Image (tube, helix red, strand yellow):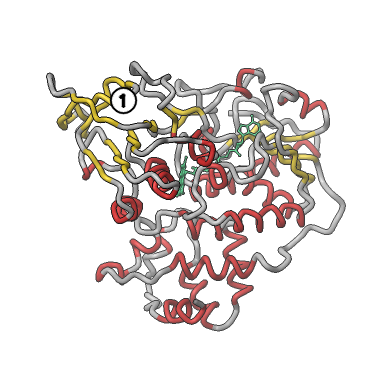
């Protein structure tokens, strides 16, 4: 394995104007990482990656590399880009076996982090390393958010998340699992009362979007995000229809096949060209035996399966492509179970119990680029602000928010008042 990594690193052309780094949303210094590895400076390389992106190890598993660093590598033009993600994975995994940089002075102000997904983890690590007294409030048993309760084990081994749990504890971060803020027990104002100087909300999007069609409440229908939380408790039968074709739908399909179901079909309202799932995820799904049906729009779900109408593409006035149903084309496609995977929106537990926290028409928390919400002292980033996006985008946004939270707390320390957006 390590020999392969080094061979891979040696394939790097050390371009004068490296394109790989340009493709990385968090500007990972890929050429430097490769140089350091080849010089035998693995820990230093790991340190550099971690300082730029505390979730480097996790991103090396789940980023869409084909569109990002590897897709931009000049060698990709010949279809042979350097396997940057594997190199990053090797270095970051190795690095996390050692103690990370830790603040040794007296603890600074208390900061509350609500949610331990990529956004909350990033801010917790950065601010703890700067000496702040961090407590994470997490509604589930374990940390990780979608990384643990959405992305399946075969794409992201949970041992990687255990390394992060160890790092959080090593940094002196306190974790309150099974604690839902705003829904029984504690609300945000309790945290201010108890001395937290700034509060971060990184609660993600966990409310499944529904189709709004007849039959959606039947016993054979499930939502993707709920299914992925714990697939073992579901009894799906022999055949499954998945409605939707994003990356979450691919995760569902590929999990269902691993649970023993052999007849799985993904239905999508548009064509192959409009698929939102990454090409590699679709390719894996196909080799794993999952079938795809295109140009099908669900009109009703029954105990026997789903009635779909055929669709065709139309061009909207803004030039984008959408679809419309074709009349008199409905047909029942039989299946034992149906899983609806058409993205998620935010829950409103916190905004419903917190004055002055504004949301947009989708229920997403209104915050500026520095994470400042409409209520002073409360910050937010990740999916709960930007809608369902990606891990690396949540980390990148949250790095800026960590800085602005620190500036805010320092301004309080000096008696200045901050302000929201
Ligand atoms: C199935 C699936 C697969 C995905 N695959 C990829 C992928 O391969 N690559 C990629 O880059 N992105 C992927 N994404 C998207 C990515 O995971 C998200 O963009 C990212 O996790 C957002 O991070 P976050 O911290 O904002 O939210 P989350 O990861 O959703 O974390 C929010 C956390 O807050 C907790 N929480 C919620 N409400 C409360 C409350 N009231 N009190 C306390 N805690 C609370 C939740 O339990 C959770 O732990 C995927 C998403 C899904 C759904």
Residue count near mark 1 (Cα–Cα under 10 Å), binned few <14, some 14–19, many ≥20:
some
Q: Is mark 1 within 8 Å of ligand 1?
A: no
Query: On screen, 413 above or below 327?
Result: below
72 left or right, relative to 41:
left
- Name the residue furthest right: 106
90 left or right, relative to 200:
left
Label 1: which residue? 304
Instruction: Name the quadrant containing residue 397.
Output: top right
| Residue that appears at 58% across and 28% down | 421
Report ligand 1 position as a quadrant: top right
Foreground: 19 or 315?
A: 315
353 left or right, relative to 55:
right
Q: How many marks?
A: 1
413 left or right, relative to 317:
right
| Residue that appears at 66% across and 29% down | 419
Instruction: Name the quadrant containing residue 11.
Output: bottom left
Q: Position of residue 269 (x, y in %)?
A: 24, 32
Q: Position of residue 24 (x, y in %)?
A: 43, 58
Q: Position of residue 228 (x, y in %)?
A: 49, 40
Foreground: 269 or 76?
A: 269
| Residue that appears at 78% across and 51% down | 131
Q: Can residue 410 be spotted in the picture?
A: no
Element class at badge 1: loop
Q: Can residue 357 be spotted in the picture?
A: yes
Q: Position of residue 75 (x, y in %)?
A: 31, 72
| Residue that appears at 66% across and 58% down | 163
């Amino acid at each position: 394995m390590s020999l392969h990594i080094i061979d891979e690193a040696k394939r790097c052309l050390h371009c004068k104007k490296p394109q790989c780094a340009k493709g990385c949303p968090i500007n990972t210094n890929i050429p430097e990482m490769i140089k350091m590895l080849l010089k035998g400076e693995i820990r230093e390389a790991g340190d550099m990656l971690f300082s730029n992106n505390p979730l480097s190890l996790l991103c090396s598993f789940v980023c869409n590399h084909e569109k990002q660093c590897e897709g931009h590598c000049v060698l990709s033009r010949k279809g042979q880009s350097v396997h940057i993600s594997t190199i990053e994975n090797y270095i970051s995994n190795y690095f996390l076996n050692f103690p990370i940089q830790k603040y040794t002075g007296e603890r600074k102000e208390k900061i509350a982090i609500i949610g331990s997904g990529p956004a909350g983890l990033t801010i917790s690590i950065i601010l703890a390393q700067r000496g702040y007294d961090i407590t994470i409030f997490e509604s589930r048993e374990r940390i990780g958010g979608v990384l643990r309760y959405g992305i399946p084990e075969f794409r992201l081994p949970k041992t990687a998340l255990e390394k992060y749990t160890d790092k959080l504890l090593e940094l002196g971060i306190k974790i309150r699992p099974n604690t839902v803020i705003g829904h029984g027990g504690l609300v945000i104002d309790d945290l201010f009362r108890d001395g937290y100087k700034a509060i971060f909300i990184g609660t993600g999007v966990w409310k499944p979007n529904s189709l709004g069609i007849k039959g959606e409440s039947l016993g054979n229908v499930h939502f993707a995000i709920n299914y992925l939380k714990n697939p073992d408790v579901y009894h799906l039968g022999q055949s499954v229809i998945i409605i939707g074709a994003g990356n979450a739908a691919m995760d569902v399909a590929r999990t269902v096949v691993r649970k023993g179901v052999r007849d799985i079909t993904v239905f999508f309202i548009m064509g192959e060209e409009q698929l939102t799932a990454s090409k590699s995820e679709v390719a894996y799904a196909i080799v794993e035996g999952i079938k795809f049906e295109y140009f099908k729009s669900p009109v009703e779900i029954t105990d026997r399966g789903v009635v779909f109408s055929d669709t065709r593409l139309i061009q909207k006035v803004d030039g984008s492509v959408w679809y419309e149903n074709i009349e008199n084309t409905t047909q029942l496609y039989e299946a034992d179970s149906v899983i609806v995977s058409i993205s998620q929106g935010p829950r409103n537990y916190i905004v419903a119990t917190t004055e002055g926290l504004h949301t947009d028409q989708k229920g997403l928390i209104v915050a500026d680029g520095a994470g400042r919400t409409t209520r002073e002292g409360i910050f937010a980033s990740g999916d709960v602000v930007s809608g369902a996006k990606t891990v690396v985008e949540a980390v990148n946004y949250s790095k800026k928010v960590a800085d602005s939270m620190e500036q805010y707390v320092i301004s309080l320390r000096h008696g200045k008042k901050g302000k929201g957006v």
